[in-house]
């Protein structure tokens, strides 16, 4: 504190509210600061100042209340940057709204260098400077990493070992591998990998593209609106996912925002589907949607040219008939195509 400022304290002595007092206590400068700078602080307010852990939260404690509570406590205390705290980069949304759109344009008159502090927070900063302590957050806290660690790609050796294990896995081993898979970056954004569900000795397999939001939440395939339509389509030819059909996807984890899977993601994930087909040995496969059809059949032909005929997939020395049809999500958007998808289902159902 400068002597000049102490002498002139009476007119500009800042009011100290209970939370500000707690910061001062936290910083170990409460007595010095109050004695030198704010001898007129309200005794009643100070008497009411809560102790740490008794309701109010000392701002800036890493182990104190969660951030939003700290932010609003700081706002209530009228401080701009709580000492030791992580200053919010933006005011809380409610705060911003309350201040209105013009708030950010507000200009603060420049203060000459070395001018006496006049607000409570300026006094606190000045007191900290005098004690050699820093009001800014410690560098380690500022640099603390947030969110999951960045994805580290599978090494070629790890990939080879994983693919060898896939080739010999039984269904439950394969399920465990899929559930814990980290072979591509999609593992970072998923809630659940979706292995597939259905009959243990299915007559049909239905293969779709990738889990959507609902499937990612529930860990099950086709459980959203397109799943309901798929169940109705299957029921129309006397099939159900409980008794006759196993439903799986080419990609087991949800791509962010339901974007198209990348070639790397397809390459990492499709061996799981191939092993599922080899283990479950379905009599036929109904592939829904362009992406799954192109991946399974190794072609870039359009869905219009792929549907309406029988393809074959070689699996474990067997040729499995494959029927291509529209994705239920597409049918929801284009109901007029349901008649064609009905023809595809009939074709699949009448294959000998
Ligand atoms: N779309 C798909 O392709 N698969 C699902 O599991 C859900 C929606």
Image: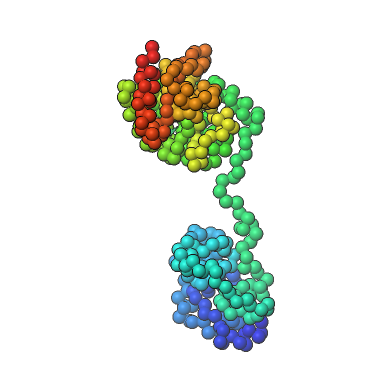
Asked whether residue 256 appears in the rendered view, the answer is yes
Say above or below: 352 vs 153.
Answer: above
Quadrant of residue 207 in the image? top left
Question: Is 161 situated above or below 13?
Answer: above
- Above or below, 260 against 174 in this view is below
**Which x, y percent locates residue 45?**
46, 78
Name the residue rendered at 49%, 62% in the picture: 92
| Structure colour scheme | rainbow
Asked whether 308 or 247 is in front, the reply is 308
Q: How many marks?
A: 0
Pick the front one: 77 or 310: 310
Query: Percent x, y for residue 70?
Result: 50, 63
Residue at the spot 55% in from the left edge and 30% down from the top edge: 266
Q: Quadrant of residue 39?
A: bottom right
Task: Assign the C terminus to one quadrant of the image.
Answer: top left
Image: 135 above or below 158: below
Rendered location of residue 65, percent (x, y): 49, 60
Quadrant of the rendered image holding ligand 1: top left
Image quadrant containing the N terminus: bottom right
For the question of whether residue 176 can be seen, the reply is: no
At 44% from the left edge and 17% from the top edge, which residue is drawn? 310
Instruction: Point out residue 235 in the picture as x, y percentages from the top left corner.
Output: 32, 25
Which residue is painted at 42% across and 28% down in the image? 326
Q: Nearer the viewer, residue 176 or 147?
A: 147
């Amino acid at each position: 504190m400068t002597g000049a400022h102490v002498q002139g304290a009476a007119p500009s002595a800042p009011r100290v509210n209970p939370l500000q007092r707690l910061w001062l206590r936290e910083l170990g400068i409460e007595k010095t600061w109050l004695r030198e700078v704010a001898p007129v602080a309200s005794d009643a307010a100070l008497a009411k100042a809560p102790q740490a852990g008794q309701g109010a939260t000392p701002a800036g404690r890493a182990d104190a209340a969660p951030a939003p509570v700290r932010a609003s406590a700081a706002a209530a205390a009228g401080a701009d940057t709580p000492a030791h705290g992580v200053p919010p980069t933006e005011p809380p949304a409610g705060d911003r709204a309350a201040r209105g759109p013009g708030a950010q344009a507000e200009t603060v008159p420049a203060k000459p260098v070395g001018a006496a502090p006049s607000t409570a927070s300026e006094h606190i900063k000045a007191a900290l400077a005098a004690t050699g302590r820093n009001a800014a957050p410690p560098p380690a806290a500022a640099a603390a990493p947030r969110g999951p660690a960045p994805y580290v790609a599978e090494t070629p050796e790890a990939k080879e070992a994983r693919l060898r294990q896939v080739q010999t896995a039984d269904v439950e081993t394969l399920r465990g591998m899929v559930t814990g898979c980290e072979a591509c970056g999609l593992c970072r954004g998923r809630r659940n990998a979706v292995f597939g569900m259905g009959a243990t000795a299915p007559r049909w397999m239905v293969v779709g593209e990738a889990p959507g939001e609902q499937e990612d939440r529930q860990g099950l395939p086709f459980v959203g609106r397109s799943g309901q339509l798929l169940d109705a389509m299957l029921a129309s030819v006397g099939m159900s996912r409980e008794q006759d059909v196993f439903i799986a996807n080419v990609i087991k984890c949800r791509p962010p925002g339901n974007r198209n899977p990348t070639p790397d993601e397809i390459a990492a994930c499709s061996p799981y589907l191939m092993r599922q087909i080899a283990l479950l040995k379905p009599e036929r496969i109904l592939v829904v949607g362009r992406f799954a059809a192109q991946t399974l059949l190794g072609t870039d032909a359009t869905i219009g040219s792929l549907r309406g005929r029988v393809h074959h997939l070689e699996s474990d020395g067997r040729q499995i008939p494959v029927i291509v049809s529209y994705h239920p999500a597409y049918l929801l958007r284009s109901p007029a195509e349901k008649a064609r998808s009905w023809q595809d289902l009939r074709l699949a159902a009448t294959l000998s």
